[in-house]
Image (cartoon, rainbow, N blue to C red):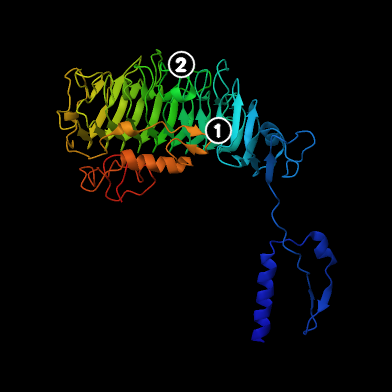
């Protein structure tokens, strides 16, 4: 009797495992059979397991949007057409080659689709206007492409994302992963504006914007995250002489009430690398706000953490971080290292119509091993920061190192290092020579980045090891205030007894 019970339970479990794959017709055709007690029971024949549908589609230079099916043996020709045809949850693989023309993303997906270069960085997207844009799309990941303007005379922006309906329905839920974005010949490389929201840029490289514009301009947008990207310029490498360029990342709101959003909000820059400044002296690696006179905060709820700023270039920068008319900004566990000729070394706080409010600096390393912290040119006066028009701020538990020289102070500034009651004035013993940094542009012919890396993740780890890693015995080890430290470091490693700066020594 026990064996019969166990057999019945086993049969029942097997039936449940079939995921209810029997149809109503199957059940209707099942025949009653008598059991040993004379009662009747129904016997169901189990159907074979049905495999998941094939949701992988292909785009190729040899494809055809009219006659193609999107399958490997009959690919489509354009990404735009593929996006208009695939089901939710699809993967679109784009084979190597140079794809000229504009990519329009014009659908919304719930589960999300991925558009991926079949071989990383080998599918090159080019256009003499916007290369890729999303005004109504949602739920899309772009992965592994080389994306740029095709030369001088292009229309503005390489990529633009916005909510054209101004109701939060489009320009949202997007992911840009492991791409090479470069060489805008008109304005920003990437424009994220007019109500765009819920967007992640991760493991990308950015270089060479145009004019007084940026790598990324976050302009009246919500919930934007930049994580583990590399920002630098190398105009000579592209045969260009543009050195009058703007800040690498700008966060602001220049359109007022047009999109029902006042100020870019909830912006996170986590674990990025900034290097090789070639821009105009009035700009910064990261800038919040601009000189416009507005009655709202340009940026609110901004977290800047775990970033590595490498001062390797001779070009004069305004400062590392520029904050204008913004509120609730936290700058924590970042590392600024090198001879960074500038108007000031660490930050510039100023205002337009509204003074800055709630600006906080925790657990950062500010280190100039040359002893010229904030000197614009050789022999100039050192200058740690420029700060004014800020109604509330905090500065605590940072490490300040000026090659053994005095940390500069200025009575005209509202913030000096002396306001940090837990200031650490010891040597972090970071690598002393940042001039060995060479702009790691992508070299399609060799399949490598300058320096020999074959992937952005490999390149990123190498740069952190060469310029941001603190050695044994560093004054930064276990010296952070854990109350303000993020849970992970620039490489994603956990912090237990946290170190000061971007890097957590294992």
- The answer to whether one can see residue 502 in this image is no
Q: Earlier in the sequence, mark 2 or mark 1?
A: 1
From the image, tell me which residue sits under label 1: 146
Q: Residue at x 44, y 17 (%)?
A: 242
Vertical order, 311 against 459 (above or below): above
Residue 13 x/y as whole percent? 65, 70
Which mark, residue 211?
Answer: 2
| Residue 97: image location, x then y, percent | 63, 34
Task: Give the farthest residue toward the top.
Answer: 293
Local packing at callout 2 (Cα closer than 10 Å; few below 14, some 14-19, many 20+) is: some
> Dot 1: few (<14), some (14–19), or many (≥20) neighbours within 10 Å?
many
Q: Nearer the viewer, residue 239 or 288?
A: 239
Residue in the image at 57% along x and 17% along y: 154
Please give left or right for residue 92 compared with residue 351 in the image.
right
Q: Is residue 425 left or right of residue 266?
A: left
Residue 406 in the image, given as x and y percentages of width and height: 14, 28
């Amino acid at each position: 009797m026990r064996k019969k019970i166990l057999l019945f339970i086993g049969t029942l479990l097997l039936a449940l495992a079939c995921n209810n794959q029997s149809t109503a017709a199957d059940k209707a055709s099942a025949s009653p059979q008598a059991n040993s007690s004379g009662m009747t029971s129904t016997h169901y024949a189990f159907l074979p397991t049905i495999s998941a549908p094939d949701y992988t589609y292909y785009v190729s230079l040899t494809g055809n949007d009219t006659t193609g099916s999107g399958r490997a043996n009959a690919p489509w020709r354009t990404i735009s057409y593929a996006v208009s045809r695939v089901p939710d949850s699809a993967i679109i693989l784009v084979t190597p080659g140079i794809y000229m023309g504009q990519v329009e993303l014009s659908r919304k997906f719930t589960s999300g689709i991925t558009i991926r270069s079949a071989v990383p960085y080998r599918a090159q997207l080019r256009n003499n206007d916007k290369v890729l844009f999303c005004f109504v799309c949602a739920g899309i990941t772009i992965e592994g492409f080389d994306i740029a303007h095709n030369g001088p005379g292009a229309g503005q922006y390489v990529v633009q994302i916005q909510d054209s309906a101004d109701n939060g329905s489009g320009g949202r839920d997007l992911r840009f992963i492991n791409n090479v974005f470069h060489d805008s010949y008109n304005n920003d490389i990437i424009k994220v504006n007019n109500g765009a929201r819920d967007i992640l840029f991760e493991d990308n490289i950015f270089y060479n914007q145009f004019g007084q514009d940026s790598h990324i301009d976050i302009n009246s947008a919500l919930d934007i995250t930049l994580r583990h990207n590399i920002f630098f310029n190398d105009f000579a490498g592209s045969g260009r002489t543009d050195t009058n360029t703007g800040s690498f990342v700008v966060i602001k709101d220049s359109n007022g009430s047009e999109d029902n959003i006042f100020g870019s909000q909830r912006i996170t820059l986590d674990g990025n690398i900034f290097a090789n400044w070639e821009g105009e002296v009035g700009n910064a690696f990261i800038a919040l706000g601009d000189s416009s006179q507005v009655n709202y905060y340009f940026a609110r709820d901004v977290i800047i953490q775990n970033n590595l700023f490498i001062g390797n270039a001779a070009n004069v920068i305004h400062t590392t971080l520029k904050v204008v008319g913004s509120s609730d900004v936290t700058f924590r566990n970042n590392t600024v290292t090198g001879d960074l000729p500038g108007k000031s070394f660490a930050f510039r706080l100023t205002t337009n119509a509204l003074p800055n409010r709630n600006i906080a600096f925790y657990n950062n390393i500010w280190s100039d091993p040359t002893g010229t912290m904030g000197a614009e040119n050789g022999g100039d006066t050192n200058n740690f920061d420029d700060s004014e028009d800020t109604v509330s701020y905090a500065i605590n538990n940072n490490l300040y190192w000026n090659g053994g020289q005095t940390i500069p102070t200025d009575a005209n500034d509202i913030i000096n290092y002396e306001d940090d009651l837990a200031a650490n004035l010891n040597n972090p013993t970071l690598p002393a020579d940042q001039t060995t940094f060479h702009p790691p542009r992508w070299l399609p012919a060799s399949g490598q980045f300058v320096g020999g890396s074959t992937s952005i993740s490999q390149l990123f780890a190498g740069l952190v090891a060469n310029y941001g890693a603190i050695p044994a015995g560093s004054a930064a080890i276990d010296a952070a205030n854990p109350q303000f430290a993020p849970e992970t470091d620039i490489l994603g490693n956990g912090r237990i007894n946290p170190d000061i700066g971007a890097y957590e020594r294992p």
